């Protein structure tokens, strides 16, 4: 038997920009199992267990962003010191300055890494000068950990929490790997108290965690990646080659893809944290059941929408300064939320679109009062749900399109060359795509009690049966996975 090739193993363990350490990779599965063995071995040695988790988290981040892991560590130390300074002073001017320093550092990093080339190229176009884009490597998940950093310092300023005096605790919070790359946006006031309790995962938490990991893998690999590679990307790459009907299906397909991709990551992140004894809040709550744009944002990417509400919308005045200002605050909050996603005018347009929807919805609520007995009727709820879903699909078409030209091409096909008659041929040619979309929507619209009951049934089964079901899901995931690694969409944000 030949000994293992150590050079190949070392190559796998070193940073490779084309092979980040993602939840849906075999390497992560192997490393996570080894890590959990060590984690459980240190079950009653809390300091060593936290230190081991921090080391694994930093390595996990290194595999995605190389030396940018030092930026993450720098933010940890900066937040820790600024938090202690804030806790020790009562001078309001000093406290405001500390918040300003924290926000400037975090927003400054976002501007440099995500927006510098866009801003500089735009200025070059305006001034008719030359600009060669810089080769800037975007640290993975920078938007997520900077938001966690800002909320920590602002919460201390608001006296909602006290500064963390244990550097190990704070480093554990900010570097904790499950939500590090693509959320949820975990807040210090939710997680630091759990860290101080030195939690241990119960049998129920382990069962729930495994169930969420399985559902996340199914959403990501079997639904999102399959729809993306076999249909959605083709339509958005060249919409003029497809009929209007196929373009509409492409937009619907991307909406389902994005939901399954992003909520799949959140499910796995929450599940992994549960295996380690930590519980996060839900990040998605059946968003396509929403009956209006406001309810959609109460159900979609909840950790981000509540962050924008608490740290942008409310400080700007919220709904306290009259209707016009309320509509403006809604619009600006969503524009900033759009820009948070990346350096592209399409993201800004997507944010403005949703800001407009929220403003129109609030204005209509003040003008058109629906009788209470009519509001709860099944027919009206269905109509509201369909309209809201259609508006969301339009928004995500903006989000996915590379340019205005792509949107124009899609619009031309939809309005001038729809050809509903191709539907039977489309269903026949893309049968598996249609089934995947239909199955995803069907599962989405089932009552929440069904999925809760399924999870409880899994949790109550013997450990051996849980393991067998997990192995079965992993087998199907491996069979369905494409040969090329498909990163999570939100890793770029």
Image (spheres, helix red, strand yellow):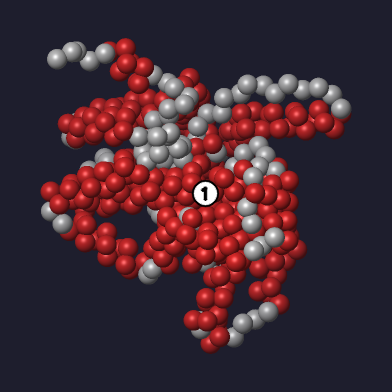
- Mark 1 Cα-neighbour bin, 10 Å: few <14, some 14–19, many ≥20: some
Residue linked to disc 1? 231
Q: Is residue 105 above or below residue 463?
A: above
Residue at 59% of width from left, 57% of height from top?
A: 246
Residue at 55% of width from left, 64% of height from top?
A: 423
List x then y, in percent, for residue 172.
37, 33
Q: Is residue 140 left or right of residue 444?
A: right
List x then y, in percent, for residue 313.
63, 53
Q: Is residue 145 above or below residue 335?
A: above
Instruction: Between residue 187 and residue 347, name the one nearer to us.
Output: 347
Q: Is residue 233 left or right of residue 322?
A: left
Residue with the most extreme right position = 128
| Figure label count | 1
Instruction: Between residue 391 and residue 318, name the one nearer to us.
Output: 391
Q: Quick one: quadrant of the C terminus?
A: top right
Element under disc 1: helix
Q: For residue 439, what is the image quadrant? A: bottom left
Residue 278 in view here: no
Q: Is residue 104 left or right of residue 41?
A: right
List x then y, in percent, for residue 190.
40, 47
Residue 420 in view here: yes
Residue at 31% of width from left, 40% of height from top?
A: 478
Q: Is residue 453 above or below residue 271?
A: below
Q: Quick one: quadrant of the N terminus?
A: top left
List x then y, in percent, for residue 150.
54, 39
Residue at 52% of width from left, 55% of height from top?
A: 253
Instruction: Between residue 46 and residue 304, name the one nearer to us.
Output: 304
């Amino acid at each position: 038997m030949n000994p293992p090739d150590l050079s190949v193993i070392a190559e796998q363990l070193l940073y490779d920009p084309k092979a980040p350490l993602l939840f849906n990779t075999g390497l992560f599965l192997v490393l996570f199992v080894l890590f959990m063995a060590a984690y459980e071995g240190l079950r009653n040695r809390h300091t060593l267990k936290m230190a081991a988790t921090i080391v694994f988290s930093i390595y996990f981040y290194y595999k995605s962003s190389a030396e940018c892991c030092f930026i993450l560590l720098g933010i940890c130390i900066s937040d820790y010191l600024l938090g202690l300074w804030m806790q020790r002073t009562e001078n309001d001017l000093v406290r405001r300055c500390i918040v300003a320093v924290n926000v400037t550092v975090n927003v400054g990093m976002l501007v440099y890494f995500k927006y510098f080339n866009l801003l500089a190229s735009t200025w070059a176009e305006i001034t008719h000068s030359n600009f060669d884009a810089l080769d800037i490597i975007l640290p993975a998940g920078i938007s997520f950990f900077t938001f966690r950093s800002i909320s920590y310092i602002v919460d201390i300023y608001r006296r909602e929490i006290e500064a963390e005096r244990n550097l190990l605790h704070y480093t554990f919070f900010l570097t904790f790997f499950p939500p590090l790359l693509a959320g949820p946006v975990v807040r210090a006031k939710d997680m630091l108290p759990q860290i101080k309790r030195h939690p241990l995962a119960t049998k129920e938490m382990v069962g729930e965690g495994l169930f969420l990991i399985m559902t996340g893998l199914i959403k990501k690999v079997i639904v999102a990646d399959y729809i993306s590679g076999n249909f959605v990307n083709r339509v958005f790459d060249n919409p003029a080659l497809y009929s209007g009907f196929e373009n509409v299906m492409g937009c619907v397909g991307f909406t389902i893809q994005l939901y399954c991709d992003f909520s799949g990551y959140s499910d796995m992140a929450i599940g992994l944290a549960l295996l380690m004894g930590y519980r996060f809040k839900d990040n998605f709550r059946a968003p396509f059941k929403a009956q209006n744009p406001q309810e959609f944002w109460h159900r979609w990417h909840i950790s981000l929408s509540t962050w924008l509400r608490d740290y942008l919308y409310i400080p700007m005045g919220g709904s306290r300064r009259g209707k016009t200002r309320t509509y403006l605050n809604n619009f600006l909050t969503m524009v900033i939320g759009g820009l948070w996603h990346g350096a592209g005018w399409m993201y800004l347009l997507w944010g403005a679109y949703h800001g407009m929807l929220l403003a129109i919805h609030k204005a209509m609520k003040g003008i058109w009062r629906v009788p209470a007995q009519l509001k709860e009727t099944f027919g009206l709820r269905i109509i509201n749900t369909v309209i809201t879903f259609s508006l969301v699909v339009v928004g995500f078409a903006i989000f996915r399109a590379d340019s205005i030209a792509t949107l124009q091409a899609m619009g031309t096909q939809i309005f001038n060359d729809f050809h509903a008659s191709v539907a039977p041929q489309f269903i026949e040619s893309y049968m598996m795509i249609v089934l995947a979309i239909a199955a995803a929507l069907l599962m989405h619209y089932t009552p929440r009690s069904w999925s809760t009951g399924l999870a409880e049934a899994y949790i109550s089964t013997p450990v051996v049966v849980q393991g067998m079901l997990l192995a079965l899901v992993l087998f199907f995931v491996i069979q369905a996975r494409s040969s090329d690694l498909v990163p999570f969409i939100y890793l770029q944000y």
